[in-house]
Image (cartoon, grey):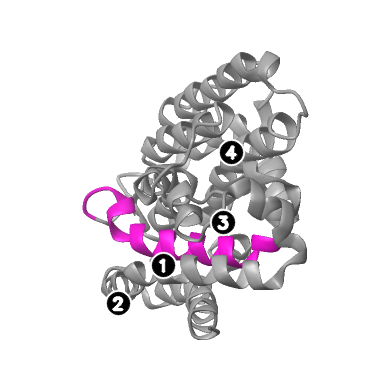
Amino acid sequence: MTEVNAFDHAIHIAKSSRSPMERAAAALDDTRYSIFCATYASMRVIDDFVDDEFLALPKREAARTNAVETVTFWRDNAIAALVDGVAPSDKDPFQKTHAALAATSHVAIVDPEPWENLSAAMIRDVVEAPMNSWQDFLAYAEGATAAPAAVFIEILALEKQNGRLKSTLLGPAVEHIRNSAILLYLVHIMRDLEKDAAKGPHLLTLPEEMFDSLGMTPSTFAATGRTNSALVHQVRNAIADYASNFLMPALGELNTLDEKLSTNDSAILRGLCIPYIEQYERFATNN
């Protein structure tokens, strides 16, 4: 498999996702777009495994250990490919996305820490750890949303240095985008609230303390929320109230990144984030 062809499967996954992040990344040059697709597809396949294969099982206990091992295998081999260009074996269930990460390592230096953080969030999903507080939510969000956002920011900041692309940002990329990522994630949750409730409480990535304050549980909301617009409105308002903590810090991050990224790359980032921020403002004022 040539280095160029190694990206093909990842590009297909990214384009098929129809995600706002992929639409924003489509404005990148070909090399950085391929890198984006490699990283996005790598993270997408493990998220899909956990949500669509494991959590969709009606009885999960017998499969839980294997699922944790699958996430750990994914993490270790993804990082080996990304950092050292280790080619995956033919028996690797994530062979094609790991191959794209190995191809990425030949052209760019990308921080592997987001893969560590995402794997922690995925394992939390697999073991179905309780989300008791907003602090638990933030710990989960560090992997579930801040990790992929950090990779996106790092890709925007890649420039050629000593033969390979390398980020021009100082320090971990997540420090430049964490508040924006959490705000956008909360907007995503608000937007999909009824759809996720219909699938069951395990997809409501919201803390027990929020439901307690509203006199309900995730299970009771999942059972009735899909047909009770007043309850949905109540929960959405509670999320919007918490999300307000991240609005000004997020706007500050975007303003700072305007100075650190090129004009075109800053426009790509704002094109991704501003529609979410506008949607948050609509949710927050629709009381």
Q: Which residue is mark 2?
A: 255
Counting residues from the start of the chain, the first of labels 4 and 1 encountered is 4
The residue drawn where x is 61% and y is 34% is: 46
Could you tell me the amino acid type at mark 1?
A: Ala
Residue 13: percent from left, percent from top:
71, 47
The one nearer the camera, 82 or 72, is 72
Pointers 1 and 2 in contact (C-beta within 8 Å): no
Residue 62, visible in the rendered structure:
yes
Specify whether residue 2 is in view: no
- Secondary element under disc 1, as helix, strand or loop, is helix
Instruction: Measure how far apart labels 3 and 1 are at the Cα level.
Output: 30 Å
- Provide the residue designation for mark 1: 243
Front one among 227 and 142: 227
Mark sitting on residue 33: 3
Residue type of the residue flagged with mark 3: Tyr
Alpha carbons under labels 1 and 2: distance apart: 19 Å
Instruction: Give the left or right position of residue 204, taking residue 137 as reference.
Output: right
- Lower position in the chain sequence, tag 1 or tag 2: 1
Q: Residue furthest front?
A: 215
Estimate how packed mark 3 is, as few (under 14), some (14 to 19) or many (20 or more) residues with alpha carbons within 10 Å: many
Name the amino acid, label 4.
Answer: Ser
Instruction: Say which label, 4 or 3, has the lower sequence index.
Output: 3
Mark 4: few, some, or many residues within 10 Å (few <14, many ≥20)?
many
User: What range of the chain is rendered magenta?
Assistant: 170-194
